[in-house]
Amino acid sequence: MKTLLFIARRFVFSTREKTIKTMIRITAISILIGSCALALVAAVMNGFEQGTRKAIQGIHPDLIITSSDAPLNYKKIDEIIKQDFKSTVASTSPYAQESALIKAADSKMITQIVTVTGLDPVAEQQTTKLASMIKQPVGGSLTLLNTPDGAFIGTTLASMLCATVGDEIILMHAPELSGKSTFSVEQATVKIAGIFKTGIDDIDSRVVFCSLPTFKNIFGHKNIATIGVTVAPHVADCTIQRELHDRFELDVLSWKELYPALLSALTLEKYAMFFILALILLVASMNIASLLFMLITQKKMEIGVLKTMGLTDREITRIFMIIGVGLAVGSSIIGLGIASIASFLLNHFHIISLPDVYYVSHLPATMTFSIAGAVLAVVLLLSIAASYLATRGLRSLETSSVLKQTE
């Protein structure tokens, strides 16, 4: 094998033909660019998927227990979970939800319909990452919701209302009719205790958080509509989801089921982009076949000499396979290195900012060993195929005819 490697290296570096040297450079650069582009785009798509999942999972608990028939008995359910699921469930948090119209206290114009969510600030801090998303006041916590009539609104909604921390807003809602043919609109004034930013526009513009006591003051009840469940790190969500469903005979949803279309689209887009950009490497690998065709034609004399010295057709084929595969793998490794550096710069220096419609604030790029391995595997397979295609004609070369040409 060492002899074949030595001959392959001599064929590449000792050639004096300018056309061959130029073709080697073109082949190396094309594979380098193709592998770099494939790895970098795959890293960006992977970063988008992880960033979106992180943003969604940060605002939602791992699992959500809900019932469409009647309010949930949170105290009883929580006691059972602490007793029967203490090793698999880390925490729970209750939620009460109602819809309302919202407007600024000094304005007569109704802004839009929002979902008012009542929660337990202490339990919520153990269940989701909402506390880390508070932008105003700086360093604020969910305990600010315990202030009388305190509420949190998103940055988008705050911009719509032209409101900031300390301002008052008005929530209007219609109580249940209870058989009456007419209804009246009730309103309640709450004070903005904090402003959050989740990166999810539907939440930042349409959700108001408050404590359960404040929720009761507004709507006259605090019926628990859903219960958030945080699963222990070592336990799979799907396992606990089935167990909770069987235990309580209630609907148990995963946070992934809240955005099925979005998550499926991200996954499909990631694989589709990888496949499409892999076609660039397919085109680049054709340069390997062209290079080896030219090299075989130029090295006919050396091939004849090697055959007379006892090398078999298979060994000569291996020489050119080593040249093609080695050139491709070496170029792709350099391309992967460039893509890794670019990914590091994009992630740590936030070079490219993104508008609020995305779930991430900057263009992310997460390079992983699986991406690098997939790119190398694609390059290896394509280079082997291209090299084999170019060396198929080697066996048709007769030693005698080659030697006659040299005479």
Image: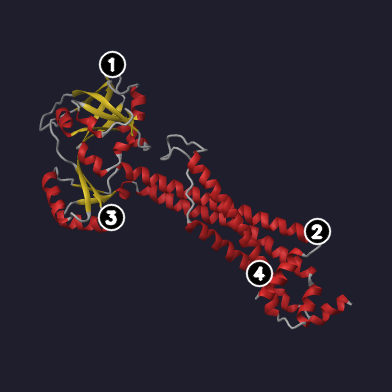
The residue to which callout 4 is attached is: 322
Q: Secondary structure at mark 3?
A: helix
The answer to the question of whether label 1 and label 4 lie on touching residues, with beta carbons closer than 8 A, is: no
Relative side of 82 to 385, left or right? left
Image quadrant in which the N terminus is located: bottom right
Residue 251, percent from left and from top: 21, 51
Q: Earlier in the sequence, mark 3 or mark 2?
A: 2
Q: Which residue type carries mark 2? A: Lys
Give the numbered dot on residue 106: 1
The answer to the question of whether label 3 and label 2 lie on touching residues, with beta carbons closer than 8 A, is: no
Between the C-alphas of marks 3 and 2, the distance is 62 Å
Q: Earlier in the sequence, mark 3 or mark 1?
A: 1
Residue 97 position (above or below residue 249): above
The residue to which callout 3 is attached is: 237
Q: Nearer the viewer, mark 4 or mark 3?
A: 4
Which quarter of the picture shows residue 388?
bottom right
Q: Residues within 10 Å of mark 1 (few under 14, many from 20)?
A: few
Q: Which residue type carries mark 1? A: Asp
The residue to which callout 2 is attached is: 18
Image quadrant in which the C terminus is located: bottom right
Relative side of 6 to 274, left or right? right
Q: Residues within 10 Å of mark 2 (few under 14, many from 20)?
A: few
Q: Earlier in the sequence, mark 2 or mark 1?
A: 2
Which quarter of the picture shows residue 138?
top left
Q: Which residue type carries mark 4? A: Ile
Q: Secondary structure at mark 1?
A: loop
Q: Which residue type carries mark 3? A: Asp
Q: Nearer the viewer, mark 1 or mark 4?
A: 4
